[in-house]
Image (spheres, grey):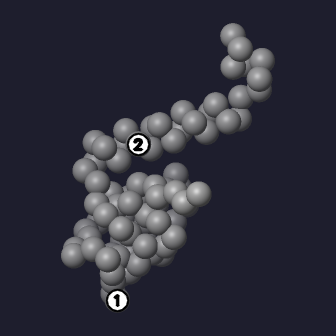
């Protein structure tokens, strides 16, 4: 299974590269597949490549859903049954 996630661009680098932030984790990615990327943009990240842009509202909504899934994953079975 492949997963693409929204991430925020925090720095644009030369050579079609950027630094992104995902929950405090920063990583250098390629932006070669997009026309332009600016600091503050949310992009969809898949295997090290920005493959599309998202508006801020949609990105935050998606990240909130991932956060809820993470909380459910870490909950004990007893927590889920109540």
Q: Which mark is residue 27?
A: none
Q: Which mark is residue 62?
A: 2
- Residue 6 x/y as whole percent: 41, 54
Q: Where, quadrant-wise, is the N terminus in this rendering?
A: bottom right
Residue corresponding to mark 1: 15
> Which residue extends farthest bottom?
15
Residue drawn at x 35%, y 47% as measured from the top left: 59
Determine the secondary structure under disc 1.
loop
Disc 2 residue crowd, few under 14, some 14–19, many 20+, Cα 10 Å: some
Q: Are marks 2 and 1 in contact (CB under 8 Å)?
A: no
Residue 73 drawn above or below residue 6 = above
> Which residue extends farthest front?
1
- Residue 37 x/y as whole percent: 26, 70
> Which residue extends farthest left?
35
- Residue 70 x/y as whole percent: 61, 39
Residue drawn at x 33%, y 57% as measured from the top left: 42
């Amino acid at each position: 299974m492949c997963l693409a996630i929204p991430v925020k661009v925090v720095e644009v680098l030369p050579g079609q590269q950027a630094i992104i932030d995902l929950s405090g984790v920063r990583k250098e990615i390629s932006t070669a597949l997009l026309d332009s990327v600016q600091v503050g943009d949310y992009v969809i990240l898949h295997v090290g490549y920005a493959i599309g842009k998202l508006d801020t509202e949609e990105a935050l909504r998606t990240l909130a859903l991932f956060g809820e899934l993470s909380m459910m994953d870490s909950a004990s079975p007893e927590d889920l049954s109540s």
